[in-house]
Image (spheres, grey):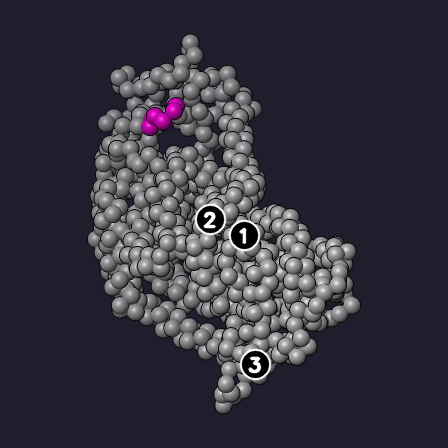
Amino acid sequence: MDGATSPVTTPTAGESLTFGQTIEPRAFIGLSLKNGLLNIVTLTLYRFWGKTEVRRRVWSNITLNGEPFEYTGKGRELFLGFLLATLLVGVPYLALILAIQFVSAMFTLLLLPVYVAMVVLIGMAIFMTYRYQASRTIWRGVRFHLSGKASSYGWSYLGYAFVSGITLGWYAPVMTMKLAERIWGEMSYGDQRFSWARAHKHNLFGPYAVAWVIGLVGYIGLIATIIPAAVGSARTGAEPSVLLFFQFYAYGLVYALIVVLASAAYHAAVLREIAASIRIAEARFVLDVKGGALLGLTLGNIAIIVLSLGFLQPVAMARTVKFLIARLSSEGAVALAEARQAPRGPKTGEGLADAFDVSPF
Amino acid sequence: MNGQLYDGRVARPWTVEVTVSGGRVVARAIEDPAVGLDWPLDAVREASRPDGRYSLSCGDEDARLVVDAEAWRTLAGRSIQDIARRGRGREWRLVGGLVAAGVAVAAVVFVGVPLAARPLALHTPPALEARFGANMEKQLSVPFRACRTDTESATLLSDLGARLGRAANAPFPIRVRAVRAPFVNAFALPGGTILVTQPLIEEARGPDELAAVLAHEIAHVERRHAMQAAWRAMGAGLLLDAVVGGGSGAGQQLIVLAGGFADHRFSRALEAEADDRAIQILRTENISTRGMADFFGRLAHRGDDPRLRRAAEWFQTHPDTAGRADKARRAIGPGQPSLSDRDWAVLDRVCRITDPPKPKSRNNVR
């Protein structure tokens, strides 16, 4: 390696990581409207290409050591993934529903295993989304790579979800960390592996307990408000009015806002802890996200999405990424310039995630 | 000119000398001539970077060549407009193709499925339709609570339905039930079950008006319109769900609205068919169509009657009620009342008879 003869600074053995971003959420309004209009005239078929364009724009405005990331995914890949998932998951499910309706009610018995399988599939969908996006993210011409098996992640997801269920949700923080480990412990940049060592720097159970208790009390309050109204309406014998349904929706919205409020500190702690647990060579990460700031971001995003009827969703996404990258820093060196190319990723992307609507971006 | 090459094998930058000649772009690393690339100029695409430079790529290759934007445009002989136009050309083709695909799907949903629904319905085995109807009735019993069926009123209602059903060639026994609902309407379910709402029975000013509505619904059953509607809704719904998939909001809503519109326009033909057949059924049973004319006529002029605001629902599912009243009026002939005054008085109370008294009475009704 001889950088001296070159006007470009050729990185030597190790470099520390400096993240930067030039994301301007307002600049996504035009793209959002264009995508929205094209979605309407194409019966939403444009959505795969629209999503790809948004990602391309977001990725290219994030830099590491001055060099931008690039998203190389294609709308066609998402579209094919969607067709595949429709065929492999949607058609059998539909066949089952029709069999229940027309052939025999005994087919209802199959619903339980199907719903269990659905949880596994949701886990697989999450994993496959990370894998696809990693394989379509390049930096300095070298792509990211997620190894490991989607099915194994899916079964773990089912197991953790089950334990979370029987512990009334108290296992959820552990589940979140274990799932993050399954992603980040298997991630690599080119041939350079990330590793995971749980930092235990940030207390998760404290803020989780606050969120859990407030969530439960709020839920009891919600039920206590709705039941008398519902019973009162049932007692008069009159059919429930439209107004009553709106009233219930309003209660639900208030409850959702309470949950967002109560869980912001927890979600911020999760983000900090995940970042603190990730390593690549000697580099460690700090994600300086506080509950209050995250709450502001979330409420702003909810307002943007709700008021624009979902059209400005890309703006919300740009805000989120900007928020995170602006708070991300790193210490310690890693020999990025020595990273060799990773194998190409899957040919199609995110079909399952689209079917279950679990794609993070 | 100089550029910066990421060769797609190792994540280190190479300073390269870039030349364009004979329609090819050639880059050679200054410090190691073995490192470089040789791309056909036509296949090279420019992507703008936040630092104002271009990142050049070629097909699916991993290598990226970063060059000064202005120097590249001069070297490659491409203007800003050329570069923008190339990208846009591909986009227009994509959007054109997708619009065509969307129109094709819409054509299948709004034209193909409705056309296929009738033959499908006529070829659906009655046993299958009956099972489907039974499931549907079970689901409808949640929003529309059934009125008691073990009373004389309920028996009179179901007997009237059965009598009219025998006059038609319905492939199913006709079962008529009264249900509670906040609107004036009656529905024919697949398989021969007919639900009549309490407000409709209260609105009817005599047995012949109710008989007219029942005859109309029985005609729907006989002609298997309910099954046809079910196939149409299922086919269109499935297809739209499949295309639209999970996470889109406003676009989906629009499609749903458009679907509802097409649905009503289509049912118009079926409604007219059911009216014509209902008039025949009433004649067979020697019931005057005056009841039909009066009932539709009153609904059509509901502006005068505040109580009839509840009939809004009727008009959503039964378009052109005034025109239909005229048709029934033209068909008016002599006839016998379909029920005696005494029986009608009993039937009229079908939903007012509530469960055996509990500590807290649930007697309702306006």
> Label 1 amino acid?
Arg
Chain name for mark 1 = B
Reading the image, the residue beneath label 3 is B353
Circle 2: element type = loop
Q: Secondary structure at mark 3?
A: loop
Q: Overall secondary structure of the magenta stretch?
A: loop
Question: Based on the displayed image, in which of its 4 quarters is residue A260 positioned?
Answer: bottom left
Looking at the picture, how far across and down is residue B279, in whole percent?
68, 57
Q: Count neighbours of disc 1 (C-alpha within 10 A) and say few if under 14, some if 14 to 19, many if 20 or more.
A: many
- Secondary structure beneath label 1: loop
Q: Read off the magenta span.
A: B58-64
Q: Nearer the viewer, residue A326 or B263?
A: B263
Looking at the rendered structure, which numbered label has been put on residue B124? 2
Q: Residue at x 25, y 64 (%)?
A: A163
Sequence-wise, which precedes: disc 3 or disc 2? 2
In this view, B268 is above or below B181: above
| Nearer-N-terminus badge (1/3) | 1
Could you tell which of marks 2 and 1 lies nearer the N-terminus? 2
Name the side, left or right, on which A21 lies relative to B35: right
- The chain identifier of the residue carrying mark 3 reads B
The residue at the point 62 percent across, 50 percent down is: B270
Q: The disc labelled 2 sits on which kind of residue?
A: Thr
Question: What residue is rendered at 51% in x and 87% in y?
Answer: B357
Q: Pointers 3 and 2 in contact (CB under 8 A)?
A: no
